[in-house]
Image: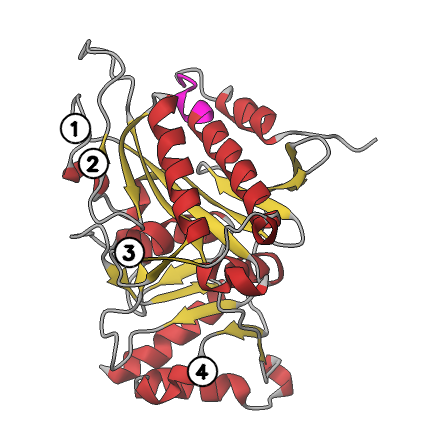
Amino acid sequence: MKKFNTIYRHIVEEERKFPEATGQLSDLLADIALACKMISLEVNRAGLIDILGMTGDTNIQGEEVKKLDVYANELLTNMMKQGGHICAICSEEEENFIPIEDKYTDNKYVTNKYICHFDPLDGSSNIDVNVSIGTIFSVYKRVSDHGPGEMMDCLQKGDAQVAAGYAIYGSSTVLVYTSGRGVHAFTLDPTAGEFLLSNENIKIPKKSKIYSVNEGNYNKWSNGMKNYIAHLKEPDEDSGRPFSSRYIGSLVADFHRNLLYGGIFLYPADSKNQSGKLRLMYEANPLSMIVEQAGGRSSDGSKRILEIEPTALHQRTPLFIGSEDDVILLEKYLSEDK
């Protein structure tokens, strides 16, 4: 008989393996899962309740803000504030981090000991055309002693993450998370209102035959990047080439497919975006923790993403992420540019 396991039960079972655990991280992850359920509901009925379209505002990135972006951002922010486990909230939609007061004032017991970064609605440009979108999150332990969170808490390297994950809202809603002990996926059962375990200990294939990149930017790429893509397109039976191109344009959707089937997602720096375009703290770091836990690799082209020292909340980076052998080969081609 198949074992049914909810996400909360799974999180608690993992927590019990560590006697020193306080349960705060488990409760925080449960709060995030609840928020993702609520966002999923709004995504599914978006066309019926006039939540699609633009608000007329722009976010810190200079992008038009969609109505559903605002809802997801406010929901996650309020959920994190009320949970009592967060000392600071960092959202891709906010220019500055949001410091949160300690629930208790006794400095010997810091209740709000975590920091949460999130991209409330990744791929939101696809909302109106019913393409899969998602929520990305990551969790760090605070490094300050007590009180509201500080900038030093929010700007930690990716390898300091204690948990990371994403929800993808597509034909079904799937939540994928890691707390440093493997990658697990849960599918939302809309009748029960629960995330049920659907893939345990996900492992990404070491080598693939799929690449995901916006080739419309080809003329702005470096020679190394152009040569790598040309290599993938060359027929060669021994190495399994040519590769297949699969690009949705929604980071969560492209990443999720590659995580399950193997592949490499590429968003390089180019002549227009010389520091890359994706956000280190909100997109690259959490997905890099996930892919490494699944046996994959993540790089900015020469350096492991999780080793990058952040200097700003909205810092951007090139991102090459997916099957290990594919990323290693990409790094070799990019080294030719130096």
Residue 22 in magenta?
yes
Residue 191 x, y percent position in the rendering: 73, 34
Kindly state the secondary structure of the residue where label 1 is placed: loop
Q: Earlier in the sequence, mark 1 or mark 3?
A: 3
**Which residue occupies the foreground of this view, 191 or 308?**
191
Kindly state the secondary structure of the residue where label 3 is placed: loop
**Circles 4, 2 touching at the beta carbon (< 8 Å):** no
**Circles 2, 1 touching at the beta carbon (< 8 Å):** yes
Q: Which residue is mark 4?
A: 215
Q: Quadrant of residue 243?
A: bottom right
**Which residue occupies the foreground of this view, 88 or 177?**
88
Residue 244 x, y percent position in the rendering: 60, 79
Q: Earlier in the sequence, mark 3 or mark 2?
A: 3
Q: Of circles 3 and 4, which is in front? A: 3
- Asked if 179 appears above or below 323 in the picture, the reply is above
Q: Earlier in the sequence, mark 4 or mark 2?
A: 2
Residue located 46% across and 44% down the image: 165
Q: Which residue is mark 2?
A: 153
Whether residue 292 sits left or right of residue 205 in the image: it is left
Q: Of circles 4 and 1, which is in front? A: 4
Q: Earlier in the sequence, mark 4 or mark 1?
A: 1
Q: Three-letter amino acid code at disc 3?
A: Asn
For the residue carrying disc 1, how many other residues have a C-alpha within 10 Å: few (<14), some (14-19), or many (20+)?
A: some
What distance separates the C-alpha of mark 4 from that of mark 1? 43 Å
* Residue span colored magenta: 21-27
Q: Which residue is mark 1?
A: 144
Q: Quadrant of residue 112?
A: top left
Kindly state the secondary structure of the residue where label 4 is placed: helix
What distance separates the C-alpha of mark 4 from that of mark 2? 37 Å
